[in-house]
Image (cartoon, rainbow, N blue to C red):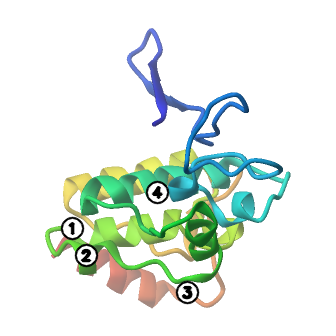
Amino acid sequence: PANIMLDRRGRVFLMDLGLAKSLGEESGMTVSGAILGTPHYMSPEQAMGSTHLSVQTDIYALGATLYHLVVGAPPFTGDSALKVLNQHVHEPLPPPRLRNPQVSEACSQVIAAMMAKQPGQRYPGWRELIADLDRVLAGTAPLPPAVRSGPAGTAVVSAAVSKAALTHQAQAALV
């Protein structure tokens, strides 16, 4: 559902991940009015009609798309768009690994972080997400949610995460 572009250096860019439908397009899964998009992939803030959308909104949509890809079904389903939207807002995400045991724990963790209910609990940007996806593809664990890059690429570490805990997690990722 996303548009993928390559630049002259071969870098991949994901465009228009909001997955919104045009007003003139007919679709049984598109809600008319203030909420516009594809309910199976909409973030909770979109489902609630918020106009304050950000990169985290697109990260959620990509997470729902990745979930569908690895599980074979969207994260939430229902017999109406409103039921699906309600689940995005209120229901816990069914862990991908529970629906498809072949999904690695690391992949399941990344998808869960991408699809956190609150935008501030998702990846802060594409670089952090891509770094964790690279870790998953390499067979190592993603960074814990408390450790993410800050705006200037500096590490932001929660006070609750001690140096010993980080060392233990890094060693566990190498096993």
State which tag comes first along the sequence, 3 or 4: 4
Tag 2 and tag 1, C-beta contact below 8 Å: yes
Which residue: 62% across, 42% down? 18
Of the residues shown, which amino acid type is indicated by label 4?
Gly
Task: Provide the residue designation for mark 2.
Answer: 99
State which tag comes first along the sequence, 4 or 2: 4
Left or right? Give the position of 5 relative to 124.
left
Left or right? Give the position of 154 relative to 144.
right
Q: Residues within 10 Å of mark 2 (few under 14, many from 20)?
A: some
State which tag comes first along the sequence, 1 or 3: 1
Question: Observer-nearest residue: 149 or 162?
Answer: 149
State which tag comes first along the sequence, 1 or 4: 4
Tag 2 and tag 3, C-beta contact below 8 Å: no
Left or right? Give the position of 83 relative to 173.
right
Task: Provide the residue designation for mark 1.
Answer: 103
Q: Quadrant of the C terminus?
A: bottom left
Task: Provide the residue designation for mark 4.
Answer: 63
Q: Where 34 falls versus 18 (above or below)? A: below
- Residue 32 x %, y %: 74, 47
Task: Provide the residue designation for mark 3.
Answer: 161
Q: CA distance from mark 2 to mark 1?
A: 9 Å
- Residue 68 x %, y %: 35, 57
Of the residues shown, which amino acid type is indicated by label 3?
Val
Of the residues shown, which amino acid type is indicated by label 1?
Val
Q: Residues within 10 Å of mark 4 (few under 14, many from 20)?
A: many
Q: Where 16 falls versus 112 (above or below)? A: above
State which tag comes first along the sequence, 2 or 3: 2
Of the residues shown, which amino acid type is indicated by label 2?
Arg
What is the residue that sits farthest to the top in this orientation? 8
Q: Residues within 10 Å of mark 3 (few under 14, many from 20)?
A: few
